[in-house]
Amino acid sequence: MSQAPLQQLARKLKIKKEEIQILMQALTHKSYLGETEGLKSNERLEFLGDSILGLVVAEYLFKKYADKPEGDLAKAKAVSVSEPILAEAAKKIGVPDAIFVSAGEEASGGRERPSILADAFEAIVAAVYLARGIDAAREFILNTLGPILNDIEREEYHRNYKSVLQELSQSLLKKAPKYRVVAESGADHDKTFLVEAIINETLLGRGTGKSKKQAEQAAAFEALKHPLFQKEQDS
């Protein structure tokens, strides 16, 4: 595999030549270890990057939105660091071309797999932190996740719960979730809807809202917590 994409990404991240080994590790999927000796996978860096990412996003939301309650901040953070969002961010900085995967993984589409790209993004966060410090890592995270953070500012991020669930379901289960109204309560002018998100009749999550769309978004958010979509299930 050509080293050019790795070098290009290092320049973009302002990682010096003497630190490029840590970036290479961040881009090394575990499948690649069977084909090359002397390398380490990005799993330990992913562990560190996940914590840094969570801290930076939580800090940003806490400072930016002093009037939002904890529940709203938690939902915004959950979307911001979700697998599809991180995978898309990884694509924008050129990770699919730079990542090291086995020939078998590549043949099966591993370079574009959301779980692999999201994990690599978290590992890159750790690499930037180790090479350049927390301020550089914060700048990288906030700049790269700018679109979703802008959605939060415009109060449009709620729309992402259903799209996040849709992408995860298609990626992991090869099926899209369905939504069904299971209960309605209240007067005609002030109804509350209870909606379930399901796949193959498996209940993923329930949510309520003053409209069916609101209830579907709430159900999708709860569904994202289902064990089917936990990252350890993806590896």
Image (tube, grey):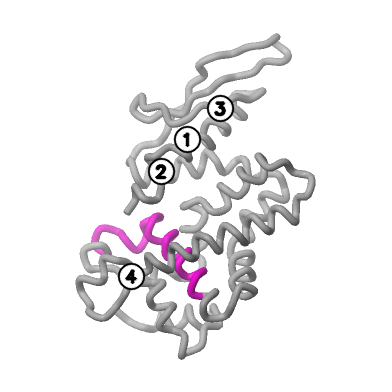
Q: CA distance from mark 2 to mark 1?
A: 8 Å
Residue holding disc 3: 207
Res 91 seen here: no
Which residue is farthest bottom? 18
**Are the residues tagged 2 and 1 within 8 Å (C-beta)?**
yes
Determine the CA span between mark 4 and mark 1.
Answer: 30 Å
Q: Amino acid at mark 3?
A: Gly
In the rendered image, which quarter is residue 26 located in? Answer: bottom left
Say the numbered circle drawn on residue 223: 1
Q: Residue at x 75, y 56 (%)?
A: 63
Question: What whole-number distance in Å separates the C-alpha atoms at marks 3 and 4?
Answer: 39 Å
Mark 1 and mark 3 lie on one chain; the one further toward the N terminus is 3
Q: Is residue 188 left or right of residue 198?
A: right
Element marked by disc 2: helix
Q: Amino acid at mark 2?
A: Phe
Q: Which residues are magenta?
A: 106-127
Find out whether the residues at labels 4 and 1 contact each other: C-beta distance under 8 Å: no
Magenta stretch mostly in which secondary structure?
A: helix
Q: Residue at horizontal 62%, vertical 68%? A: 138
